[in-house]
Image (spheres, rainbow, N blue to C red):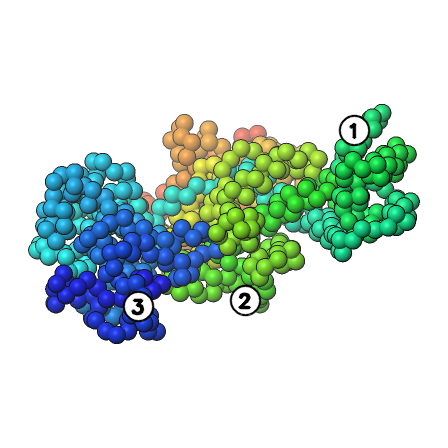
Amino acid sequence: MNGNASGTGPSAADVPESRPWFEPSDKVLVGRRTVSPNVLTFGDDTVTVWDANCLGRPANQYRSWGRIAFKLDGSWLYTAKVIVLVSLSPSHPVVVDAGIRTRHHGQSPLTAARLVHGLRLLRQAGVDTALPKDISGWTAMHFDLAYRSVRTTASANGHDDALAAVRAIHHLRPILPHVTYTGAPEVIWSGTARRTQNRGVLSTETVDPSVWRSTIRAALAYVQVFSADIIAARETQRRYQVTNRTTPSAETIDRGLLALKAIPVRAAPNPGADDATLSKLINRRVTSLLISDGATDMLLTGNRPSVRLRRAYAIDRIKLGYWTCTGLHTPVARLDGQSDPWTDSLDAQRLNREEAMLRVACYLLIAALTFMRDNEVQELRRGCVTRYYGLPAVESIAAKGKSFAPRRTWWVNEEVVQAITILERRSPDDRLFVSTRGHATDTVGFDAGGQITEFIKHVRQHANQMGLEPIPEGRITPHMLRRTMAMIAAQEPHGEIAAGIQLGHVFRRAMAGALTAGYTSETKNWRSQFLSAEAERSAQDLTASITAHGADSLRGPGARRIHAETAATIADKTLTRRLLTRFPDLHFGTFSLCLGDRSVAKCVPEGSDEPLELQRCEPDSCTNCVITATQRKLWEADRAAHSKLLRERGLAQQNRDQITSRIEKIDNVLRERRVDGSSNTTAGVGTGRGQYHGRDEPPP
């Protein structure tokens, strides 16, 4: 912290000798360096605001992030300063020497500010309930009374802060000279704060599936297609900048007018437009720069006779067809299936807008596809792309929960590398994301949430011309991007482990912890999307099995329903589409294929909208169950194992009955179901002495 957070404590008269905070000395220790004693001191009551931004402010935060306003006085102010200093620097020698056990790293200034807020609420509650004005006169019962008063008057976050403040005071009593009560307030044992009660259950919502798809597609279009025109237009504009601010001669101007092959206009002129309308359409600044070869941008501005003559000449050229609506650059890029470029005009104003949208598109891809937090994305620097274990990756600062700023690595794909390459080419600073508001802001980065909202509005406005689908109404925040992508990744085999590693959770958490599970848990608005993807994969696998082994290889109570769909000889792609149309909720398991028909499913109650509970599957009787040729081998092996057990001597009759019942269920699963309703048992499979060996033989 800065110097005003250090120094000597209160005077010897105010602070008992047994509990000093700082020993008086000529120089004061601040971290690992010493400062002269003429700086503002720790116990100076005139210092009521601390600025902790020197601890390392995240790129996406304003200066107010590190400013802690105490708004307290007397012993309350001193107590607040001690609590804040321990919160920010828990390894301070005074804390260690007092034997106080604290966190291994400092907390965020925002957390420290909430502790101060809790202290202010407690003090105000004390005033309202006529408790002693000075904290030294408070007993444990007084803290209980004040906290109960806060619970009845403050918001939920407010009484959380007050509870945290009471606990901090009780924990730090050995170094708080004004706190002298005995015993302990009852409230410190009364449960936990609301914000920590459901730890492991993530409250962050996911992005709606339709909003997610259309937003990511728009971001990809900007990065992979539109970026070429935007970058080319910016390079063209740089060539049109005023270079020497000189007044060209009349001869130079005339020569420039004659050489001008096209008059840049902001929009295509309508047929029959009058001179006044055409004059307003002329991009006067760019045209002037073209005429003067970058010497001035004022040749067409004003009402001087020479200026009016030049504008009249430009209007005549427009009427003759010598015009272009590109302003700076002629866009040529277009999305697949589109006949026209993604936009008609890129003048200076539109270019600034599109360049800002390109940066937001890059941010969306990076934040969504890497699982990085907002501050981690905005800490990216030029040259951050590297390789990690042979794969492309990016390096950035991981600041959450750290008292220092370690660098972390995230694996990335080709789209993210392309977005970073564009940012490196366009960013004027070493940081890839710098403030768009220049001196009007005090943050290093930019407002990601607000910029994403602007991006969505912009795409909606120009979606038809760009060839994009309009983005539906829906909320997107940087953290929602992280949450949604983690959930999507977890749907793949071992995806939760991969998501945990990419999220930065330790391996133990990635394997079985609630932290990663909270990020990757499925939500109802995505359930149908995942089921559709699973059904498509299952239909493709079923088609491959039918193609390789024939439809007659299918067994199980539901095999007859598949036979009905494959009665005619159909091409593979057509069969897959037909299966999906008939059974939209197909699901492949290890031992069986579930057709997903809720009307006949036995694993969920009738009328329930919950997913099928495949762990309760009854494959011998549920007509959703189908056994493929590969799965049939597992069932036959299971039957052989039970048949071997049945031949054991001395087997109890109860166990023998259970094994026999299991064998009968397996035979019922493996019995062939025909379209006409008849059934045969698979060759080589029987129930004992009545075993038969031909498919055309009658069942036992």
Q: Is residue 479 visible in this depiction of the protein? A: yes
Residue 221, disc:
none
Name, please, the residue furthest toward the left.
Answer: 182
Mark 3 surroundings: few (<14), some (14-19) or many (≥20) residues within 10 A: few
Secondary structure beneath dot 2 equals: strand
In this rendering, which labeled residue sits more in front, label 1 or label 3? Answer: 3
Q: How far apart are marks 1 and 3 (CA)?
A: 70 Å
Q: Which amino acid does label 1 sit on?
A: Thr
In this rendering, which labeled residue sits more in front, label 3 or label 2? Answer: 3
**Above/below status of 285 relative to 274:** below
Q: Distance between the residues labelled 1 and 2?
A: 59 Å
Identity of the residue drawn at 41% across and 27% down = 607
- The first of marks 1 and 3 along the sequence is 3
Which residue is tagged 2?
Answer: 388
Secondary structure beneath dot 3 equals: loop
Picture coordinates of residue 117, whole percent (x, y)? 28, 47
Which residue is tagged 1?
Answer: 277
Identity of the residue drawn at 55% across and 61% down = 381
Which residue is tagged 3?
Answer: 38
Q: Which amino acid does label 3 sit on?
A: Asn
Q: Is residue 211 or residue 349 the one in the foreground?
A: 349
Corner quadrant of residue 178: bottom left
